[in-house]
Image: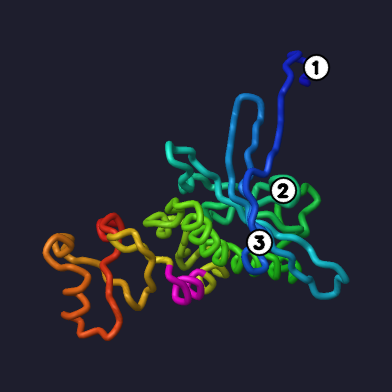
C-alpha cells in the first residue's frame, strides 16, 4: 500500500506450466501486478562456480503475448539484466536474464574485468541458446509454434563493437545441431536441409520434392517459411 496515495497494489505470481528438459527447469509464469498482467516462460539451470562449494541458479526468460489459441513470444522487449533486482545493464538479447553477478557499490552495474561475472555471462549465453530448443519442444507439445521466423529476432548476432560476443558461438552451436528452422509447411528442419527461395516466387513453382531433385540431395530438402525469405 502506498501511504502517500492510499493506493493498494496487488501482486501475484503463479506457475501455470512446468517441465524439466534435460538439465533445464522450464516454467510458464503468470504475473499480476495491479491491473497489469504478464506471462513469461522462464528457464533455469544450476551452474557450479569455481572456488565456491555450492551451485547457483541462473535464468533466462521470454515475455509472452496472449492470442486466441495460446501465446507468442514478445520480440519487441529489451529487458535489463537482473541480479535479484534489476540493474541498469542490457545485453540486448530480447530476453530476461538473471545471475548472481558481482555488482558495483551502486548495485546498478556489473563489475568489469571480473572472472566470476565473465563465467556467468558465458553460462547465460549457453542457456539462452539451449532455451530455444526448449521453446520449440514446448510448442510442439502444446501444438503451438513458439519458434518460427522470430528465431531471427531471438538470435541477436552482435556487430564488431558489441560488448558481449559470447552469445554468437552458442547460437551457432545450437542452430547447427538442432532442427530449428521452420519450413513453409510448418515443420522444423536443419540448416543443412533448408534453403531460402530467391526470388520468393520460387515457392509457388518449385515443391520441396522438386528442390531435392534439383539439388541431387540424398536427404529431403525444404524451403524455409516465406516470411523468413522476405526478411
For disc 2, the marked residue is 108
Q: Quadrant of the C terminus?
A: bottom left
Seen from the viewer's position, the closer of residues 104 and 145 is 145
Count up the numbered dots. 3
> How would you rate the neighbour count of disc 3 (Cα within 10 Å): few for under 14, some for 14-19, many for 20 or more?
few
Q: Which picture quadrant has residue 11?
A: top right
SS under mark 1: loop
For disc 3, the marked residue is 20
Q: Calculate the distance from the C-alpha at mark 3 to the C-alpha at mark 1.
A: 42 Å
At 81% from the left and 66% from the top, the residue drawn is: 55
Q: Tell me if label 3 and label 2 are in contact, CB under 8 Å.
A: no
For disc 1, the marked residue is 3
SS under mark 2: loop
- How is the protein colored in the picture? rainbow
Q: Main secondary structure of the magenta part?
A: helix
SS under mark 3: strand
Seen from the viewer's position, the closer of residues 46 and 21 is 21
- Of pointers 3 and 1, the one earlier in the residue sequence: 1
Seen from the viewer's position, the closer of residues 74 and 101 is 74
Q: Which region of the structure is painted magenta?
A: 171-179
In the rendered image of this protein, does residue 72 appear above or below residue 101?
above
Q: Tell me if label 1 and label 2 are in contact, CB under 8 Å.
A: no
> How would you rate the neighbour count of disc 1 (Cα within 10 Å): few for under 14, some for 14-19, many for 20 or more?
few
At 43% from the left and 66% from the top, the residue drawn is: 180
Q: Is residue 90 left or right of residue 227?
A: right
Is 177 covered by the magenta stretch? yes
Q: Is residue 229 left or right of residue 106?
A: left
Amino acid at each position: 500500500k502506498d501511504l502517500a496515495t492510499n493506493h493498494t497494489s496487488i501482486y501475484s505470481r503463479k506457475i501455470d506450466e512446468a517441465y524439466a528438459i534435460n538439465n533445464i527447469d522450464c516454467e510458464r509464469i503468470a504475473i499480476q501486478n495491479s491491473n497489469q498482467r504478464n506471462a513469461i516462460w522462464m528457464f533455469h539451470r544450476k551452474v557450479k562456480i569455481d572456488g565456491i562449494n555450492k551451485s547457483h541458479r541462473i535464468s533466462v526468460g521470454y515475455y509472452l503475448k496472449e492470442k486466441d489459441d495460446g501465446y507468442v513470444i514478445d520480440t519487441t522487449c529489451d529487458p535489463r539484466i537482473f541480479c535479484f533486482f534489476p540493474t541498469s545493464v542490457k545485453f540486448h538479447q530480447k530476453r530476461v536474464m538473471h545471475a548472481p553477478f558481482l555488482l558495483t557499490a551502486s548495485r546498478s552495474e556489473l563489475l568489469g574485468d571480473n572472472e566470476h561475472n565473465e563465467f556467468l555471462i558465458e553460462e547465460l549465453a549457453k542457456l539462452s541458446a539451449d532455451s530455444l530448443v526448449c521453446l520449440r519442444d514446448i510448442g510442439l507439445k502444446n501444438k503451438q509454434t513458439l519458434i518460427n521466423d522470430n528465431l531471427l529476432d531471438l538470435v541477436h548476432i552482435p556487430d564488431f563493437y558489441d560488448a558481449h560476443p559470447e552469445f554468437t558461438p552458442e547460437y551457432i552451436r545450437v542452430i547447427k545441431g538442432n532442427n530449428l528452422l521452420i519450413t513453409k509447411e510448418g515443420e522444423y528442419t536443419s540448416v543443412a536441409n533448408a534453403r531460402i527461395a530467391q526470388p520468393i516466387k520460387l515457392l509457388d513453382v518449385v515443391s520441396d520434392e522438386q528442390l531435392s531433385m534439383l539439388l541431387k540431395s540424398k536427404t529431403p530438402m525444404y524451403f524455409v517459411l516465406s516470411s523468413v525469405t522476405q526478411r
